[in-house]
Image (cartoon, helix red, strand yellow):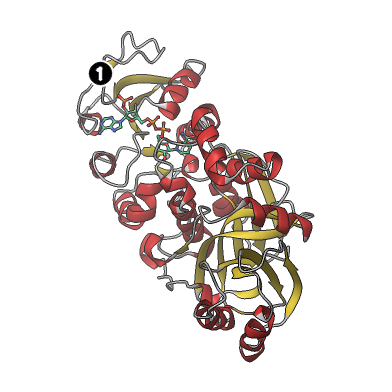
Amino acid sequence: MSVMRIGIAGLGTVGSAVFEILADHPQFKIIAVSARDQEKDRGLNLEGVRWVNDPVQLALSPDVDVVIELMGGDGNPALSLIREALQRRKPVITANKALLAYHGFDLACLAEDNQVPLMYEAAVAGGIPIIKIIREGLAANGISAVYGIMNGTCNYILTEMGRTGENFETVLTNAQKLGYAESDPSLDIDGGDTGHKLSILSGLAFGCVPDFKSLFVEGIRSISIEDIRLADELGYHIKLIGQARKNASGAILQFVSPSLLPKSSPIANTHGVLNGILIEGSYVGPSFVAGRGAGGFATASAVVADLIDLQHGKNILPFGMPARLLSSTQKASLEDWDGAFYIRLVVKDRPGVIAEISPILRDSNISIESFIQRGRSMDQPVSMIMMTHETKGHNILKAITQIKELDCIMDDPLVMPVLKI
Ligand SMILES: NC(=O)c1ccc[n+]([C@@H]2O[C@H](COP(=O)([O-])OP(=O)(O)OC[C@H]3O[C@@H](n4cnc5c(N)ncnc54)[C@H](OP(=O)(O)O)[C@@H]3O)[C@@H](O)[C@H]2O)c1
């Protein structure tokens, strides 16, 4: 087998781990690398490896057979590097979910036009081979839903809040100290990262164009320790869930939302930094996979798996079907979510509050399965928790709009879907 000559752009958490793993795979030779700071000590032996300041040079170098993009970011230089490489018919491997969520369609078209592989197993759920599972392993199935935990940082925060009883801010600060959350955590905790991954999985599962803008995205900032405790009392765990499913009229709807899951569900039992994703296939039924969704070596494992596939001559269309046949998606809103809901209202603790809220729920066709109100201190804010029976998201939004206007409501209501799986 001839030696494959590799160019790596990005020598951070993932790039350095790929560099180390490839030391055990002599069939791959790293020819050139690029990162921002050539002086940084990365603990890697870069002797005999060419350094290029401009990562795009890797695509232009005649001695580089394969380009591995591990810089991140949803624009240049990652985008121009991948474009240049594909145009020169050089296979590309990337872990860059943000880039694929915005440019996945264009890049897949470019790869197909040039008949060259564009591989991205590491872009979703790190070390879990979820791309391969959906695109190849479940290829015989029609997929009706894909959902689960796709962001280890959020899962760690929610798990730690439940375990320690500490509030969101405290747990986030600890997660940052431990390296489980970025110094700017917004892409993780506001749901963007889950959304990027979900739009890629939707593309594979439903044959639709990855389109981040069509997602409904809600993060975990508003989850309080009280929500975690009360959900627990009701038999649920709260997780940040990315979910894509087909509705009755065949439209693909994609949601990222903190959600309640029964404690018995495998997703609810996926704790800490782990990811867990469930796929419902027409023949196979529900299939669940869990594992390390991030971390240098777990993610690098998926990058090197792509490299090995490449060496075996594998060239599968990036989305498992011609990109130009991918369909468009419909913009999702909570209005489109049919099911049970968790509602937290912060109300003034005074007589008559329930009498004010009840007619609104009744007139919106919402019936309540469970109800909890804690605390007793006249005219002080207390939380009122309601779990609804199955209803239409439209009914919930209608009721919440009216409830918000009541004089007894002291804060924005929190609404979360309840997944019955
Ligand atoms: N970390 C994970 O667990 C994980 C999991 C799944 C997917 N991913 C994806 O993998 C990719 C890499 O993530 P990471 O965690 O390894 O990131 P990282 O630690 O921040 O490393 C990024 C690397 O890219 C280099 N870089 C950034 N901008 C550059 C530019 N303009 N020109 C040249 N080099 C540039 C940096 O150079 P310097 O070192 O000189 O600053 C660094 O070496 C991202 O797309 C990420 O979303 C990461």
**Residue at the image point whose x is 31% and y is 16% from the top:** 40
Amino acid identity at mark 1:
Trp
Work out whether 258 lies above or below 193.
below
Work out whether 91 lies above or below 395.
above
Q: In which quarter of the image is residue 240?
A: bottom right
* Residue 348 visible in the snapshot: yes
Residue 416, horizontal then vertical, whole percent: 60, 65
**Residue at the image point whose x is 52% and y is 16% from the top:** 24
**Residue at the image point whose x is 31% and y is 14% from the top:** 49
Residue 104, horizontal then vertical, whole percent: 36, 53
Residue 34, horizontal then vertical, whole percent: 28, 25
> What residue is pinned by disc 1?
51
Q: How crowded is mark 1: few (under 14 residues within 10 Å), some or many (20 or more)?
A: some
Q: In the rendered view, does 346 fall on the left or right side of 55? A: right
Question: Circle 1 — which element?
Answer: strand
How many numbered discs, if any?
Answer: 1
Work out whether 223 lies above or below 60.
below
Q: In which quarter of the image is residue 53?
A: top left
Work out whether 82 lies above or below 4.
below
Residue 290, horizontal then vertical, whole percent: 66, 44
Q: In the rendered view, does 116 fall on the left or right side of 193? A: left
Quarter, ligand 1: top left
- Give the camera-side residue of 136 and 344: 344
Q: In the rendered view, does 268 fall on the left or right side of 53? A: right
- Give the camera-side residue of 16 and 216: 216
Q: In the rendered view, does 17 fall on the left or right side of 236? A: left
**Residue at the image point whose x is 58% and y is 83% from the top:** 395
* Residue 143 visible in the snapshot: no
